[in-house]
Structure formats: structure tokens, C-alpha cells
């Protein structure tokens, strides 16, 4: 990692700089020949892809005078990870912080937020974004009521996608070009396909922007949307799953956030994944690659495998030995370790030869 041999001024220096890891065992399991590469964001210091966004939003707001030390209070509606990134930055910089979080989101996230000194306000589950009880509406009400209250607003803030354009994307490009020079594995030297889930859409549009502008305009960019969300295009992809609820956190939305409307033409296609697909893919990440990741990492991988197996372009790419297929794996299992779905998943397929031998001991 770029920072491992230096002394960092603060923890913010260890945001991002995440590894791109070959998912060879999963590729082999699926019969793929391509380089299947996971960008593992759980190793960012706050534990997720959203650390990058939080850091940049805070730094830019300080620069343009929106945030004033000793006066401002940071308030943010989030599904948790942006909140954790903001709470980390605010702990370092001395801003009070209030995070507004739906009841859907895990107790682990709330505990992490409180540990970092944030106040946490919970909003009811299953509320539409335009309700006066939504996390966005409650955050707005708090902003009006709290003197010095500032919402940096990841759903509209251009620094959200920019953080990915300026950090996530270059890290991927650098890793791919370094491997093309130093590894004996075949490589096109460029990113040939890119997959990301969408919550705000910042990861997807930010990396897409960098790819289209500077790297490989021919790279396939695929958004992974959860069944029950309305972010995928064409909208007909979403219709069969209207009113579907889902357990995976941090992804999906019932209104397209402004961040995602930036250059929608940059996204070539969308795939839809459900909880079952996500949990099956997460089991592969854990059991075949040793990666303890969160539910949306399962969604991201499930969408990637679906596109590579079920589209003509995908099948061609999957069989190309030199193709670099990158999937962003947004957070780690810290956020979900006590969730019932994870407890079930962790104990699943314990009926192996060895566990029956152990049962006899
Ligand atoms: N996965 C998780 C766990 C997240 O917290 C988020 C952010 N809400 C995402 C995926 C989606 O990231 P983005 O907001 O960049 O679309």
C-alpha cells in the first residue's frame, strides 16, 4: 500500500488505497478465463468505500467556508457508511456530528457511529424518500433546528462522485497497468469491464467518468441494482420487483439521486440482484477467497457473475484470458456480524465431511 512506509498525519491519510485482489478461485469455479478482480474497500481505515466520499466532502467544505471549526455541526442522512466516514473525520477535526439513519440499518453501524462520538437519530423503516419521516426529511429538520447545522448531502454533492473519479479509479488503473508490466498473467493493460452497486451512485458515476474521459472508452460499465430499488435503466428492469423488500444495506433507492443522473449515458447496462443472489455470492467470497465482506459485496459479485454468464458480451469477455474485469466490494462484515442473515450464512454448509467427524469426537 502506498502509505505503509510513511508516517501519516491523521487516520484520514489511510482512507482508500485499497487492494485490487484476484478472485481466481471464483473465476475458476465459474469457468472464466479472465482476470476477475475485486476492489476490496473494507481495508480503508473507516471500513468502507464511503470513507473516500466523507473525507473529500469535509475537506472541500472546509476549503469553501461551508464548514467552520468551532461553529459548524455536521448532519447527514446516510445508510451508515458515509456516517462512519464523516464521524471519523469529525472526531479528528473536532466537529460535532449527528447521523440520521433508518431503523433498517444495523446496530453494528450505530455502535460504530456512537463510538466515534456521533449522535445517532433513527428514522422508521420502509419510509419513502418524500415522506416527512424519511432520513432525508428528518436531517433537513435537524439542520433548521440546530445552530451551525450543515448537511454536506452525499446525494447531490459533486464531491461524492469526484472522490471516486480522483481516487478509486486511478488506484484501479495503476494496479492494472503495474500488473501488466510485472505479472506473467495475460493482461490487456486496461480495465475491460467495471461493476459497482448503487446507493447514491457515486462509485458508479465517478469511476465511469474517469474511464470514459481518460482510460478505456470501450470499457463496459455495468450498474448492479437491488431487486426492489428503482435505480436501474431501462425502468422496465425494475417493474417485476416493485414492493420487494431486501435485507442488503447501503444500496438501492426509490428515487434516482442527482449524483446518479450525472452522465447516465456512461453506464452501458444494469443488472438486478436479490438477497439470495447476494448471499450466495458472499459465501463464495468468504469460502473461496477468504474475504469477510458485507452484503452489498455479495450483490456486486452476484451482478458481475450474472452479466458475465447471461449476456453475449459478458460470455465473450469472461473467456478472454487478458480481460480485466473489476468489481467494487464496498464494505466488510464488521457492519453486519450480528445480523441474523449473516449468522445463518456463517453456519451454512457446516455439514461437511470434517464437521461430521468432529461431531463424533
Ligand atoms: N454498499 C454499501 C455497504 C454502502 O454503504 C454504499 C453506500 N450507500 C454502497 C454500497 C453504494 O455506494 P454509492 O453510494 O457510491 O452508490
Image: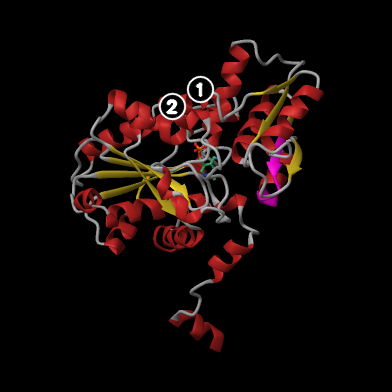
Report the disc number at residue 158: 1
What is the x, y in percent for residue 356? 50, 84
What is the x, y in percent for residue 220? 28, 39
What's the residue at 55%, 24% (across, down)?
Answer: 157
Pick whichever of labels 1 and 2 is earlier in the sequence: 1
Q: Which element carries disc 2, helix, strand or loop?
A: loop
Whole-angstrom CA distance, mark 1 to mark 2, is 9 Å
Q: In which quarter of the image is the N terminus?
A: top left
Q: Does 54 appear above or below 330?
A: above
Q: Does 278 appear above or below 62?
A: below
Q: What stretch is highlighted in magenta?
A: 98-108
- Residue wearing tag 2: 262
Q: Which element carries disc 1, helix, strand or loop?
A: loop
What's the residue at 66%, 46% (across, down)?
Answer: 109
Name the residue furthest bottom. Answer: 360
Instruction: Indicate whether residue 210 is drawn in magenta.
Output: no
- Say whether residue 129 is left or right of residue 70: left
- Say whether residue 298 is left or right of residue 51: left
Labelled pair 1, 2 in contact (Cβ < 8 Å): yes
Tell which of 110 and 90 is nearer to you.
110
Amino acid at each position: 500500500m502506498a502509505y505503509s512506509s510513511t508516517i501519516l498525519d491523521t487516520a484520514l491519510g489511510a482512507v482508500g488505497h485499497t487492494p485490487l485482489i484476484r478472485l481466481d478461485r471464483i473465476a475458476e469455479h465459474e469457468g472464466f478465463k479472465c482476470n476477475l478482480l475485486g476492489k476490496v474497500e473494507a481495508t480503508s481505515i473507516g471500513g468502507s468505500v464511503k470513507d473516500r466520499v466523507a473525507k473529500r466532502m469535509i475537506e472541500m467544505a472546509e476549503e469553501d467556508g461551508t464548514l467552520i471549526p468551532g461553529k459548524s455541526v455536521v448532519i447527514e442522512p446516510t445508510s451508515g457508511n458515509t456516517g462512519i466516514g464523516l464521524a471519523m473525520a469529525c472526531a479528528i477535526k473536532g466537529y460535532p456530528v449527528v447521523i440520521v439513519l433508518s431503523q433498517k440499518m444495523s446496530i453494528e453501524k450505530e455502535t460504530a457511529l456512537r463510538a466515534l462520538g456521533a449522535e445517532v437519530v433513527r428514522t422508521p423503516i420502509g419510509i419513502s424518500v418524500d415522506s416527512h419521516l424519511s432520513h432525508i426529511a428528518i436531517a433537513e429538520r435537524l439542520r433548521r433546528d440546530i445552530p451551525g447545522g450543515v448537511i454536506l448531502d452525499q446525494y447531490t454533492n459533486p464531491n461524492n462522485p469526484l472522490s471516486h473519479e480522483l481516487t478509486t479509479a486511478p488506484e484501479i488503473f495503476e494496479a492494472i497497468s503495474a500488473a501488466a508490466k510485472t505479472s506473467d498473467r495475460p493482461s490487456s493493460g486496461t480495465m475491460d469491464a467495471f461493476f459497482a452497486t448503487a446507493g447514491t451512485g457515486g462509485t458508479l458515476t465517478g469511476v465511469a467518468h474517469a474511464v470514459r474521459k481518460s482510460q478505456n472508452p470501450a470499457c463496459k460499465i455495468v450498474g448492479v441494482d437491488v431487486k426492489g430499488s428503482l435505480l436501474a435503466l431501462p425502468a422496465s428492469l425494475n417493474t417485476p420487483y416493485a414492493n420487494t423488500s431486501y435485507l442488503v444495506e447501503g444500496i438501492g433507492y426509490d428515487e434516482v439521486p442527482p449524483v446518479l443522473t450525472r452522465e447516465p449515458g456512461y453506464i452501458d447496462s444494469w443488472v438486478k440482484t436479490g438477497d439470495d443472489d447476494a448471499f450466495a455470492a458472499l459465501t463464495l467470497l468468504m469460502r473461496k477467497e477468504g474475504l469477510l465482506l458485507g452484503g452489498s459485496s455479495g450483490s456486486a459479485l452476484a451482478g458481475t457473475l450474472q452479466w458475465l454468464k447471461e449476456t453475449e458480451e459478458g460470455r465473450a469477455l469472461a473467456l478472454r484470458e487478458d480481460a480485466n474485469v473489476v468489481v467494487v466490494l464496498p464494505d466488510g462484515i464488521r457492519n453486519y456480524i450480528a445480523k441474523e442473515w449473516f449468522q445463518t450464512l456463517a453456519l451454512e454448509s457446516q455439514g461437511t465431511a470434517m464437521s461430521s467427524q468432529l461431531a463424533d469426537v
